[in-house]
Image (cartoon, rainbow, N blue to C red):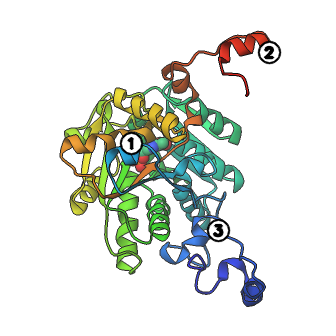
Amino acid sequence: MASLSPSGEGYGGSLRYLTPLIRERGHTLPRPSGVIEHYRDFLPVSENTPIVTLGEGDTPLVKSRQIGPALGCKALYFKLEGCNPTGSFKDRGMCMAVAKAIEAGRERIICASTGNTSASAAAYGAKYGLQTFVLVPAGEIALGKIAQAMAYGARILAVNGSFDDALTTVRGLVEILDIELVNSVNPFRIQGQKTGAFEIVDELGDAPDILSIPVGNAGNITAYWMGFKEYKAAGRSKKLPHMMGFQAAGASPIVQDRIIERPETVATAIRIGNPASWKRAVAARDESGGRIEAVTDEQIIAAYLKLAREEGLFFEPASAASVAGLMRLPELGVDLTGKTIVCILTGTGLKDPGTAEKRAFVKMELVEPDMESVMALIGAPRRK
Ligand code: AN7
């Protein structure tokens, strides 16, 4: 029952009254819907904050069957953030940002995005009747993400420039327009996203030794570090993880310690040259005794296919960067033996069907619709 707020207020008065009866009869209580209700004691919400939710959070933590044992660690878990309602981790923070926007009386939200933030903003904007504007770098967004923003009915402004240009533009705009910025420079985004760390500790009973996570605008690594620290301060965990962040080599400003003017990578979600939370990512790395390293596009695609083919996990290239990076750590001198590791898989592979089509090198085999033709291709022995 750790998931219930002390007053049980998220469920309303009648349920609070019924709770002992429900337990007595052996029924389970309804799960809290969404991260605001579940973790409200750790979030900046008041009775004036609406509970905004699409059912985000509570994502699976699944144990690796191949990659973990091959690395010699005690256990490697993947946190499947692609199981969030819009298919990425962004929903954890977006529900908070939208709740606070509504609380402040806003009727419009805006963001710059490499795709997932825009899909998430568009979905919550649609449910809660906010007009949503998304600025995306023209021609650089994975198809699934654009399809989502279109379906949810957002206004999509394709800018003739990079994500970084788009973010600079929206940051200026919200200074003069009555519109809420829902990028992770909005502090409520980070607040919501820290719940990912809470879920890991709640499930494992403590923090892992190592957290592996992709880094783009650096909001998520910032949020996880905040979450782990807050949970430890509250006595929910005994230790803190080493934070291991991974950027794509062609978009690795933090690793190179300089702004990258023209970032390039197959992992379009993290094609970012000047991350907004740069300093806080460096702080997370240094305070935790962690690393922020680069992985090449080849390493990202190799990890992307390995995840799919050895673990049954189809996640987008940016997510695979955290797996590629983890596999590089031993050669970078980090000992993984006996360690408990959690790898954050940030967005579903369905977001980016083009990459699978281009990089998986699987051809469809045309065949006549009869048993002989299909048997000839399958080549399986006959039943005994
Ligand atoms: C799948 O949607 O920046 O370091 O505009 O979509 O918190 O930025 C997405 C980033 C990792 C990096 N994995 O997280 C956006 C956007 C996926 C992502 C990241 C993103 P941050």
| Label 1, ligand 1: CB separation under 8 Å | no
Q: Residues within 10 Å of mark 2 (few under 14, many from 20)?
A: few
- Asked if the residues shown at circle 2 and circle 3 are in contact, with their CB atoms under 8 angstroms apart, the answer is no
Of the image marks 3 and 1, the number of the one nearer the N terminus: 3
Query: At 67% from the left edge and 70% from the top edge, which residue is drawn?
Result: 31
Taking 196 as reference, is 13 left or right?
right
Identified by mark 3, the residue type is Ile
Identified by mark 1, the residue type is Val
Look at mark 2 in the image and give the residue it sits on.
371
Camera-nearest label, 3 or 1: 1
Look at mark 1 in the image and give the residue it sits on.
323
Look at mark 3 in the image and give the residue it sits on.
51
Q: Nearer the viewer, residue 301 or 162?
A: 301
Q: Nearer the viewer, residue 77 or 103?
A: 77
Between the residue at mark 2 and the residue at mark 1, the CA separation in whole angstroms equals 41 Å
The answer to whether residue 249 is above or below residue 28 is above
| Label 3, ligand 1: CB separation under 8 Å | no
Secondary structure under badge 3? loop
For the question of whether residue 42 can be seen, the reply is yes
Q: Residues within 10 Å of mark 1 (few under 14, many from 20)?
A: many
Between the residue at mark 3 and the residue at mark 1, the CA separation in whole angstroms equals 34 Å
Q: Position of residue 30 (x, y in %)?
A: 71, 72
Q: Residue 326's quadrant in the figure? A: top left
Taking 297 as reference, is 307 left or right?
right
Secondary structure under badge 2? helix
